[in-house]
Image (cartoon, rainbow, N blue to C red):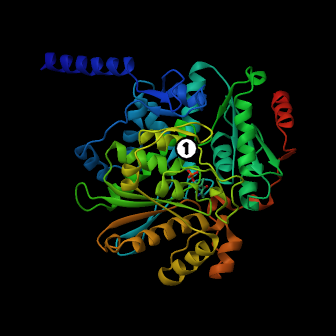
Amino acid sequence: MGAEVASSSRNDKLENDNEIMNPLKFYSTNHLSEEVTFSRALLQGQAPDRGLYMPVAVPKITAAEMERYHNLDYPGIAFDVTRRFMVGEIPDEELMRIVKESYNYDVPLEPVYNRNYVMRLDRGPTASFKDFAARMMGRLMQYYLKKENRKLLILTATSGDTGSAVANAFYGLDNVTIVVLFPEHEVTDRQRKQMTTLGKNVHILSLDAKFDDCQALVKQAFSDPELKHLPLSSANSINIGRLVPQIVYYFYAWSRLSKTEGEKVVFSVPSGNFGDMMGGVLALKMGLPVKRFIIATNENDEFPVYLNTGTYNKIEPSRNCISSAMNVGHPSNLARLVDLYGGIMDEKGNISNPADMVLMQKELFSVSINDEQTRATIKEAYDKFGLLLEPHGAVGWAGLMEYFRSEPGHNDPDQLCVSLETAHPAKFPDEITRITGINPELPESLKGIDHLPEFVTPLEFRYGAFKEYLKQLK
Ligand SMILES: *Cc1c(COP(=O)(O)O)cnc(C)c1O
């Protein structure tokens, strides 16, 4: 008996050692940088060759392992899914602590009709789905930075929700200073206040420019040799640390709603920079039974056109729509998607090696929804089903309806479908009240910010001005 215990604990130890020696590696989608482990990719953000990090092998989850998810809570599933990307680089107790702290709020799956559901990813502290990624990424970064006694200067451009989620997740952390750039005409008052009412280690810059312009400044800073001395990193969805947590809720939805082993789900994902949908596609590659992903964009239709024709043209400048967090003319995660389907796309959007478009079309369906359709969808969903959607979630729901209409076979009442709602309706009160006549109640986390003082620095839209600002930061 005693000997058995000893030998089994020795086996455990051997397995652990093995894991420590072989953490999963990540390569750059531009294939010109070295492979790195999860913690390096997390702290670096973008690869030195300006590509995006991807796992050399997508970890697999078997059907038997997935069956256990029915009995795990959200943090439990988050632990099991994300651990596979960072095994050997973080002790299990630490990872468990991080997922428990990060996911201390509800993830409602609201039934609508037949087997169609809306997954509300809006119950975090900033009431957008970006909390899922930012809270976990912030805590992972803090863990590694503290361990290595290092500091980081995080630069992030936001079209609305990234900035607040990231600022909130990093607020008050010792080892991190954060700078957020936002287009002043493209965010709502509440979105702005969620960023500007923090202060401390959170620096907010407002620009008379578009989101793409803000993102271009951040990208230029990263490649500026004169800023090499600054410990720059990014928290945009190009960071693998943002992507990995976004795989989890797809597994969670399946674990709560599927009725039979291996039952396939249709997911509809309102998309801008494609971080959210990349989480879904990675879940599929890990083994999640998915029938189809619907990638719903607003009027920035570069992706639906690409999926249907194989020809990619970014949209410059990006088109302004009421789903403002999705006003993206060239999704920063698209290089990852192309990579996953065997192609190569560089950071400028040039495709040097085409992706497997046949497989992509089989697994993905994409449609562009204009503002008029978005508003009509908010009204119809509310009138018909009492379903309250904000503009981003409405694009997702409209995408699902378009999918049903596209082929008779798609509209099967027994098919399980989940449409993602990515923000709380109270973040867009004007639009919602005008359309439905009701004023959505503020979630607890948003109450009170309307009257707090704001800390914000207006910045001229010029790279030199941004650079000077960064150089004077303490
Ligand atoms: C960021 C955001 C999106 C788009 O997500 P991506 O990962 O960039 O595709 C959709 N809805 C809301 C509310 C967002 O904040």
What amino acid type should be assigned to the residue bearing mark 1? Asn
| Image position of 422 with respect to 372: above or below | above
Q: In screen coordinates, is 113 left or right of 239?
A: left
Residue 411 position in % (x across, y down)? 35, 73
Quadrant position of the N terminus in the picture:
top left
Q: Which residue is mark 1?
A: 333
Relative to the observer, which residue lies in front, 100 or 265? 265
| Image position of 122 with respect to 90: above or below | below
Residue 372 position in % (x across, y down)? 63, 75
Who's the residue at 43% across and 50% down the image? Answer: 280
Q: Is mark 1 within 8 Å of ligand 1?
A: yes
Who's the residue at 61% across and 31% down the image? Answer: 50
User: Regarding mark 1 in the picture, which secondary structure is present there?
Assistant: loop
Q: In screen coordinates, is 59 left or right of 391?
A: left
| Image position of 97 with respect to 305: above or below | above
Q: Residues within 10 Å of mark 1 (few under 14, many from 20)?
A: many
Residue 185 position in % (x across, y down)? 79, 58
Relative to the observer, which residue lies in front, 25 or 463? 463
| Image position of 81 with respect to 40: above or below | below
Relative to the observer, which residue lies in front, 169 or 44? 44
Q: Is residue 75 visible?
A: no
Q: Is residue 98 visible?
A: yes
Figure quadrant, ligand 1:
bottom right
Who's the residue at 78% across and 22% down the image? Answer: 226
The quarter holding residue 88 reads: top left
